[in-house]
Image (cartoon, rainbow, N blue to C red):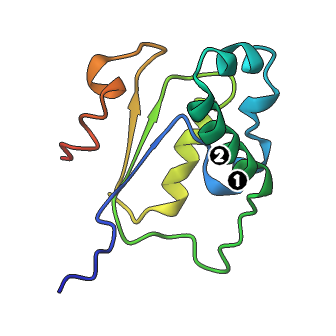
């Protein structure tokens, strides 16, 4: 049997855990308009995610480091700045962090969940 432990972490436009308290996309002026574009099931799923975000608290103790590579993708958006996404480097071992700057563009591979998540270096 395998322990089924994670082998890598890919985050997308998400601040590092210690900065997550300031990440509130659900307070953006366009939130309700974007949410209403989805069907009821999707809205429910998104609302459950929002509830998790509102209750999140970073409690990592004395150890920040993960023992797996971290790839952080950023579009440089207002809600999650490049600096807040790049702060994930504090959670990786030396040489185990990669920042992918997408410069505000939606790349087809990114939207479909391909590379770097499915094709890591």
Q: Which residue is mark 2?
A: 49
Dots 1 and 2: beta carbons under 8 Å? yes
**Is residue 72 shown above or below 56?**
above
Front position in the image: 32 or 40: 40
Front position in the image: 49 or 103: 49
Left or right, 120 with respect to 45, comes to: left
Left or right, 52 with respect to 91, comes to: right
* Cα distance in 3D space between marks 1 and 2: 5 Å
Tell me the SS state at disc 1: helix
**Crowd class of label 1 (few under 14; some 14 to 19; many from 20; radius 10 Å):** few
**Residue at the location (18% across, 42% down)?**
119
Name the quadrant of the N terminus: bottom left
Front position in the image: 42 or 13: 42
Q: Which residue is mark 1?
A: 52
Location of residue 96 in the rendering, given as x and y in whole percent from the top left corner: 34, 58
Front position in the image: 34 or 68: 34
Q: Residue furthest front?
A: 40
Location of residue 72 in the rendering, given as x and y in whole percent from the top left corner: 44, 42
**Residue at the location (63% across, 37% down)?**
46
Location of residue 18 in the rendering, given as x and y in whole percent from the top left corner: 70, 57
**Crowd class of label 2 (few under 14; some 14 to 19; many from 20; radius 10 Å):** few
**Residue at the location (58% across, 23% down)?**
39
**Is residue 23 shown above or below 101?**
below
Q: Which mark is residue 69?
A: none
Residue 63 lies in what quarter of the image? bottom right
Left or right, 61 with respect to 88, comes to: right
**Residue at the location (81% across, 15% down)?**
29
**Is residue 53 shown above or below 75?**
below
Residue 81 lies in what quarter of the image? top right
Location of residue 58 in the rendering, given as x and y in whole percent from the top left corner: 71, 64
């Amino acid at each position: 049997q395998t322990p089924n432990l994670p082998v890598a972490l890919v985050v997308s436009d998400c601040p590092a855990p210690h900065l997550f308290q300031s990440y509130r996309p659900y307070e953006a002026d366009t939130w309700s308009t974007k949410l209403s574009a989805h069907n009821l099931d999707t809205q429910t799923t998104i609302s459950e995610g929002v509830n998790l975000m509102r209750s999140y608290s970073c409690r990592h103790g004395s150890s920040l480091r993960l023992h797996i590579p971290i790839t952080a993708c950023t579009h440089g958006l207002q809600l999650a700045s490049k600096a807040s996404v790049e702060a994930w480097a504090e959670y990786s071992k030396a040489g185990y962090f990669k920042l992918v700057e997408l410069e505000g563009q939606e790349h087809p591979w990114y939207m479909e969940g391909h590379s770097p998540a499915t094709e890591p270096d």
